[in-house]
Amino acid sequence: MQSTTRPELFQGIPAPLRLPERAQRFAYPLAVLALGAACYMAALAGFWLSPTDTSVSPIWPVTGIAFGVIYLYGYRLWPGLFLGLMVALAQSFEHTAASDIYLLIAGPAAVFTCEVLGGVWLLRRIGIGRARTFLDNPSMVFRFLAVVVLVTALGSMLVNLLLQLREAEPQNQAFMLWLTQWLGSIAGIGLITPAIVAFAKPYPMRWSRALIAEAAGAFLLLYVAAHVLFGVWPLGLFSAPVPLPIVIVLLWVAIRFGVREVALALLLVALVAIHGTLIGAGPYLAASLTEAMLLTLIFLIVLTAGFYTLAAALVENRRSTAALRNMNVTLEQRVGQRTEALARANTELKQYRDRLEDLVTERTADLELANREIESFSYSVSHDLRSPLRAIDGYSHALVEDYGDRLDAKALEYLKRSRAASQRMGLLIDDVLLLSRVTRHELILHRVDVTTLARSVIKEIESADSRRSVKFVVQENMSVEGDEHLLRIVLENLLGNAWKYSARKPQARIEFGLRKTRDERVFFVRDNGIGFDMHYKDQLFGAFQRLHDPDEFEGTGIGLATVARVMTRHGGRVWAKGKVNVGATFYFAFPQRRRTTGPRKALADDLDLDV
């Protein structure tokens, strides 16, 4: 018995109305019996509504009830539909011979059962499953109506064929009977199934006294309009089929209420219309009652399709409006949160900015103090240290001149070394002071003719040692925006080093030129001197760093550090490449004042670095 209990049988049923858990094992047989009883009574009502000149019901409520129930609660309830129809048809055709039972009773019952099962299967195949949402979407309503039209057309055709085989209906009325039965089936499913589905759904509307009074007034007006239109109350107000009052009231119900109320209103209009047509009244009178019923059914089907679609569109619009309202509320909340966060961030940023200003003020004061200390140190170096050095050098020189003939060769060598050390110390002090002045020098930027400046430095170098013959190659029309005084220091150091380290070459060559890239203006000084090992390239631009012995090449190790300091002041950079006994190339680059965005490339790869 456990296998017969399915949760789907209780979907959509309110909890207070469900069976107790012990009784749920009987849920399936009870549900089948309940559906069978409902179909039996609906079939009897359909037969009762049949016109006197035909046995075909104008509206077939059986399939409407079964369609809705099986759609909601599953295929397993089909025996209830089949048994209810069998009993009702057997009672209708009570004088049928035993040989005709299959054609007139079991055949139609099976056809109507297959019609309902096939319709529900098609609905689920096209995306209208047990979610019961097709009344909330106009496109789903159209799909539902299309399936209903298709399955009822096939079912009515098969039932009519069975009746014609046993001559249960006149042959000359076969088409009219099929059409009446088809439209009746469409009207039955189209009116009753949406009502069942609508009442099985949770109902979100909250009723107030004013709303109840408005609904009662709308249904009362609809009842009166339907009775007047279909001649149940022959007041002589309508001489033509003008359903405008009914349409207006239905619009009122659809706009102000929901799908449930529209379903009840359409059922009310259908009952009054069918009753009026059966008693020979209403706007759709024709030569026969069957033809009049056909016109009434067409009116009801059009009314049903139109207003269920309208109700679904209104429900979808209300749902979209509510979703949009919720989105607006959520958006406002998020905007408020972001605004508060932005206000907090601005407050924190102001605090950070105030703190940064305080730090800048403190660091500026510290820097000014450090500069004053550097100036004091520079003054001490230039005056206090120079005096003892000059004294050492002077007394050593006087000792050699005055007492040189009394001293032996070793003593004279000592004095010579003492004088050389004091003089070298003086040069070192000069270079340190120059490095300090470069750091504190105020930049005066303007366009500098670098070609002219280089030729001036070369002329001074050549005049200091006229015995050497060096070939200088200087590129024409070189210029850059910078401080001319500091640029001269750069050229004096780099050209002077090239002159110094190419002294052992019988045919020395020094080249000074410019290479432009997208981001920088790169100057270079190239020589064919002794070069250097690239493993020590990181030591070149440090203070007091030397790659050669002082006895081999004079110098203090401050010159390249001064060059690097000057280029840093200009926002540029300096680097070098070389090879031992082949030569060296030193590059110093200035940033372009109007350079494009993008990553800076390795400029050395863009240049001709053959040395």
Image (tube, grey):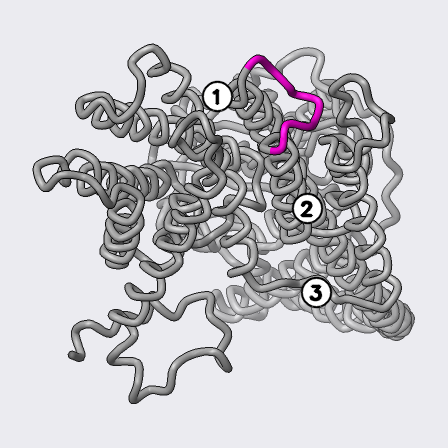
Query: Separation of disc 3 and disc 1 at Cα?
Result: 37 Å
What are the residue bounds of the magenta stretch?
279-287
Contact, mark 2 vs mark 1 (Cβ under 8 Å)? no
The circle drawn on residue 393 is 3
Give the residue pinned by disc 1: 509
Along the viewing direction, whichever of 170 and 538 lies nearer the viewer: 170
**How many residues crowd around disc 1 within 10 Å: few (fewer than 14), some, or many (20 or more)?**
some
The amino acid type, in three-letter code, at marker 1 is Arg
Q: Position of residue 288 (x, y in %)?
A: 53, 17
Q: Position of residue 33 (x, y in %)?
A: 30, 66
Identify the mark nearer the N-term, 2 or 1.
2
Along the viewing direction, whichever of 247 and 202 lies nearer the viewer: 247
Q: Is residue 575 above or below residue 278?
A: below
> Which mark's residue is nearer the viewer, 3 or 1?
1
Q: Position of residue 416 (x, y in %)?
A: 57, 62
Q: Position of residue 518 (x, y in %)?
A: 61, 24
> Which mark's residue is nearer the viewer, 2 or 1?
2
Give the residue pinned by disc 2: 265
The amino acid type, in three-letter code, at marker 2 is Ala
Q: Is residue 587 left or right of residue 156?
A: right
Q: Is residue 18 left or right of residue 87?
A: right
